[in-house]
Amino acid sequence: MPGAMTARVSLADTLGAILMGVIFSALIYGISSLHGFFYLHKFHHYDPWLLKAAVGSIWLLDTLHLVFAIWAIFFYTVFCFGKPAALLEIHWAAKIVVVLSVVIVLLVQVFYVYRVWRLSGLKKRGVVSIAIVAVLCGAAFGLLLAVKTVQASSFLELSRPDLSVATQASFAVATAVDFAIAGTMCYYLYSSKRVIPRIRGSRLHVAINTVIHYTICSGLLTSVTSLACLITFITLPRTLIFFALSFILTKCYVLSLFTLLNLRRGKSLTPDATRQAGESSNSYSMGYRRNGTTHHLDVCPIFVPLLFSRSPYDVKTMHDRPVVVGVHVDVERGIDPVLDIDGNLKASTDW
């Protein structure tokens, strides 16, 4: 940590920051695990075993990352209670968290480089080669930081010039690589109509969905978080805010990867079926009968963010069989929805 850290410790900037970082990282972990479940449900028959093994390994590493982060905050809040100076000690669980963070970031960045190469039509080998070199440089600084952190026994040692330079270089290279990948990914996603299909709904609905998907799936979210880690490390040297943000940064990498994987289309669907699925996933049909005539209305649902719902580009439902929703509108009684999982509309004597 640049500068000297005094013996006087602020609980809000150290213990409080780590606690909030663990809480937010746990929330993001739950969301990314949900996306991991969606991935297994949609693509376990289509993707090669190597990709599925990589996804499972990253999820396992992410789980261990959260477990050790929770144990670290438990140590600092329980065993260090009433001992502010003990908060300067780097617990062994915190050291493992740093090592796992470096490994997860490396794996996700390698996948991003591969994804950019695929989106470019397997042509931009020069750009991909430069990106690989940049990722390896970031991994080298990250591994150096992990080794130095494991060897250190106190956060005070992070103020040493070698550790300070390694930390700043690790965050700086990771930020530069993430922004470069995010910019390239956004360009190819924007120019490729088959990656992000047209969304039905209001302009605000379309704009919000587009911003969320470009931000999460391109890696822009991880870029901003990594930049925040670098800024807080330089400007707030006597706090552990940067360490708390590093917890969240790792979870953002995993969430970004799983979300990007879920945005792909199933190989078993035809282009027409995929297009219809992509268009219908953001609208629902309501049917009602009046004066002997059946009417159908396309209703755009209230926007629900991507993080808390299925992707609006999902091409498969959560059931193997189609779900049909029937809505019976009666002037006196209101709306009576009828749902049949088997795809058969339930009989109604009023229709």
Image (cartoon, rainbow, N blue to C red):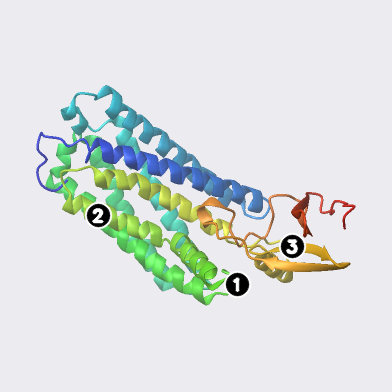
* Disc 1: CA contacts within 10 A as few (<14), some (14-19) or many (>=20): some
Q: Residue at x 63, y 64 (%)?
A: 282
The nearer-to-camera label among 1 and 2 is 1
* Dot 1 amino acid type: Arg
Going from the N terminus, do you reach mark 1 or mark 2 first? Answer: 1
Cα separation between marks 1 and 2: 37 Å
Cα separation between marks 2 and 3: 51 Å
Q: Residue at x 63, y 54 (%)?
A: 47
Numbered disc 2: secondary structure: helix
Q: Residue at x 28, y 43 (%)?
A: 146
Indicate which disc residue 198 carries.
1
The residue lying toward the viewer, choosing from 193 and 324, is: 324
Going from the N terminus, do you reach mark 3 or mark 1 first? Answer: 1
Where residue 184 sits: x, y (%)?
42, 70
Q: Is residue 137 visible?
A: no
Q: Quadrant of the N terminus?
A: top left
User: Which residue is tagged 3?
Assistant: 286
The nearer-to-camera label among 2 and 3 is 3
Q: Is residue 333 above or below residue 238?
A: below
The residue lying toward the viewer, choosing from 9 and 173, is: 9
Where residue 280 sits: x, y (%)?
68, 65
Q: Residue at x 52, y 44 (%)?
A: 33
Image check: 33 left or right of 266? left
